[in-house]
Amino acid sequence: MKVSVIIPVYNKKDYIEECIQSCLQQDFDSFEVIAVDDGSTDGSGEICDKIAESDSRLKVFHVKNGGVTAARRYGAEHSSGEYLMFVDSDDGLLPGAINRLYKEIEKTKADEVIAGFKSDKGWVVVAPWGGFVNTELLISELLATHNTFCVMWAIIFRRGILDGCFDIPREVIEGEDIATQINVLAKNPKAFLLQEAVYLYREDVPNNRKPGYACIKGLHDVVEKALRPQWDKYEQLFRLHQAKSYESYLERGGDDPKLKAYFESLRSWKGSRGIPYKDRIILLLPPAIGRWLVRKYRKGRR
């Protein structure tokens, strides 16, 4: 088997059939689709089972709810492809996606080929760079929360490069894609960026996730652990990532006492030269004023 496409599924009955069909209709001769029903309660798993009855390339697994990263890990462990791809259950693949990514990773001998996406509203997003890219640049972009390239989807991975990269706590319900990709990039893989759209991203899908202390602190712990071997290189960028997390917390009007105490501890940093002046000011201001500034400048960017 050349390629395994893994779809974590949780309560996406309105989208999952279209997602799976976009994968099964690919013009490629050796692939499987692994749907991991992560404890859905809305009938999503049954829809997957029905499709599998008529197409043996689709394998469906039903597991206890453990979160998207655990579902991806389970799918990877039960797949047989030389290369792995991941598709969110409310998105899909554009025609020719597997074939295009497979040819590129075979030609370049990269560990991961990162392409772009097209939204269901018609706009296309590709990375500003093409070809092989230094992994330090990609890590820097992720830590600065710059959404300049796809993080888990629209990518084909060489199987071995993902070993150990799904070690993300269940509590991390936001940013888990970033943590997984940083785990990959910390291995200094050969990363190739393809400036073509291969993935269909669906906008405006409802999302009721509310990241609290366990999520944010857990995410930071995973990222720090991955970067520790190169801490001299990444410490200031990691501090910037924490500052950006604080700004997002302020923007949402957070009132979690544990998070408040955690972010208060960040205000005592020394040597924050790697953090832009604007972010340092917000970190040091009283939260009410900082929240006003964050909402003002983030509104101006939209």
Image (spheres, rainbow, N blue to C red):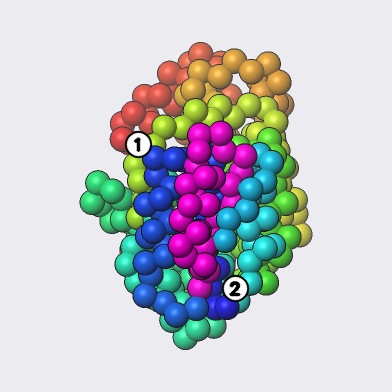
Where is residue 38 shown, x and y percent of the image?
A: 61, 43
Quarter of the image for the C terminus: give it. Answer: top left
Bounds of the magenta span?
31-58
Q: Quadrant of residue 228?
A: bottom right
Instruction: Tell me the mark number nearer the camera, choosing from 1 and 2.
Output: 2
Q: State the residue lying farthest toward the bottom.
A: 107
Q: State the residue lying farthest toward the left.
A: 122
Q: Point out which mark residue 295 bears.
A: none
Q: Is residue 275 above or below residue 129?
A: above
Q: State the residue lying farthest toward the front.
A: 53
Q: Secondary structure at mark 1?
A: loop
- Amino acid type at mark 1: Asp
Cα distance, mark 1 to mark 2?
A: 32 Å
The residue indicated by pointer 1 is 204
- Amino acid type at mark 2: Gly
Regarding residue 135, the answer to whether it shows in the image is yes
The residue indicated by pointer 2 is 81
Q: Is residue 37 magenta?
A: yes
Q: In the picture provided, is 219 more to the left or to the right than 45? A: right
Q: Is residue 140 magenta?
A: no
Q: Earlier in the sequence, mark 1 or mark 2?
A: 2
Where is residue 168 shown, x and y percent of the image?
A: 70, 47
